Amino acid sequence: MDMEFSYRTRTSDIEKIKGKQCDVLIVGGGITGAGVANILAANGLNVVLAEKGDFASGTSSGSSKLIHGGLRYLAQGEIMEVRSLLKERNYLTANTEIVKPMDFHILVDQYSWRKGTLRFGLYLYNLLSGKFSIPRFRENQGLYPESVEGYFVYSDSYTDDSLLVISNIVTAKMHGALCLNYVEAVEFVTRDSGSQAILLDHTTGERFMVQPEVIINAAGPWAGELSSKLDLKLEHGLKLSKGIHLVVPAEKIPVKNAIAFRTYIDKRQMFIIPRGEVVHIGTTDTFTSEPDDFEVTDEDIEYVVKSVAKLFPSLRKEDVITSFCGIRPLFGEGNDPGTVTRDFELRMKGNVLSILGGKITNYRTASRDAALKVSEMLGRAVKTKGLPIIEYKRPDMSLPERIEYEIYHECPVYTEDIMRRREAARIYTLDMGKSIEPVVREQALKAGMLKE
Ligand SMILES: Cc1cc2nc3c(=O)[nH]c(=O)nc-3n(C[C@H](O)[C@H](O)[C@H](O)COP(=O)(O)OP(=O)(O)OC[C@H]3O[C@@H](n4cnc5c(N)ncnc54)[C@H](O)[C@@H]3O)c2cc1C
């Protein structure tokens, strides 16, 4: 890719847009904002995306990183939702290199659904994904502790959630969108001449104004906060639920496949997901009132470790290398976070479109539906069929070359943006990326990103 997208073009892009009009201002650079920016820019609209932190620094880097239909949603009767998620899973697995299939063992024991229920559920799951296959039960045969009777095998997919976001952002940029990280939407003013949004560049402390025709609220768990700034009231409100994952060494849980099981503590479904040198285990699902509540408490750690240690008894709290956390933006009824729908909802009021809820798996569906609403709002034709497409791919390179490439093509502003979201080495390696820190630092210095 010839186009530069770096901390340098970020500064010149801010200069270009200061005080100017644009068709659409998207607030939020998670998967939702990135997907819709990709579609709208591909349609030639004049798009500005403002993200208050780094791209994917919110929930979209704190997920379980599964691209899945959500077997457990079948038990909640959400058949059409599961069907639509599976369709997206199939598309992304077939067409996106960073989405890969993975085998899961779903365990049968006294805490799981009954064997017959699971067999029927998996049969339906396969059928909804367009595959006719009767799930076969396999005896435990020493793979798991004796309390586990056996397991069924099924397939879903996994991804690197931050990279999925960044790939959509870079594609949007390739189509002309101005995607600005570390730029927060802090105030909105409505005048006879239209809306003005006041944006704050966190790297300089400078405020500037843009005049969007349409504003998209894609602020995930911060959507409620943003809607107050926009003077909108979200009926039924947004519910927030915190989910944590722990990162443990692969040698502690030596499995090739992922595992889905229900914890003996409260029968919630949990996952064990091998990611190379490490394994991710989680997650929790607890209501919180704060979109910034990223604290992983001792109680959270204990709950996850105890649940997994029932299957892998040598696992101890001390084995935990690190953790990550995300806040689910949920929009729906229910007093138990596990039962609130994971579907998305679009709300239109004046020139503001809010995209609420949703999953990473269905980001393309949410983006297409949102793009059609924008088309209505602007009175301009927008093509959505087959979109969004990811057109950006990092070439295969040595580590120093790759870091340099990321600096000039994926717009990290700080070295930690590389460590956490371009390489994501903090959560995918045993040493939390410490061994690559010198290379990242050297490349950042060379590129003038870091001052000595
Ligand atoms: C623990 C957990 C596990 C999950 N697992 C899965 C899974 O396996 N598969 C799946 O499909 N989904 C999963 N999800 C759901 C999925 O992660 C979320 O639905 C999705 O990431 C939400 O994306 P988003 O873009 O709406 O929100 P975010 O990623 O949070 O993006 C919103 C962005 O808006 C920015 N922002 C907020 N206010 C402003 C402002 N005023 N100005 C500028 N920027 C602003 C924030 O900084 C943030 O980056 C999981 C969620 C959690 C919490």
Image: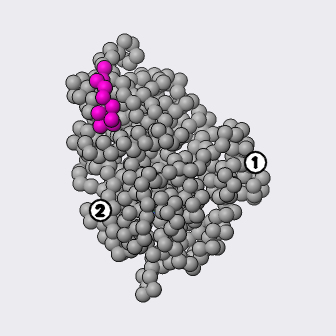
Residue 239 marker: none
- Picture layout, residue 19 above or below residue 73: below
Mark 2 is on which residue type? Gly
Which residue has dot 2 on it?
237
Which one is nearer the viewer's eye here, 309 or 99?
99
Task: Mark yes or no: residue 253 visible.
Answer: yes
**Which amino acid type corresponds to the residue marked 1 in the rendered image?**
Glu
Neighbourhood count class around disc 2 (C-alpha, 10 Å): few under 14, some 14–19, many 20 upward: few
| Residue 62 at x, y percent in the picture | 47, 46
The percent coordinates of residue 267 (x first, y second) are: 28, 33
User: Where is mark 1, residue-wise?
Assistant: 442
Residue 379 covered by magenta stretch:
no
Percent of width and height locating residue 132: 30, 29
Residue 118 visible somewhere in the drawing: no
In percent of the image, x 63 and y 68: which residue is there? 13
Q: Secondary structure at mark 2?
A: loop
Q: Which residues, given as a range, are shown in magenta?
A: 127-136
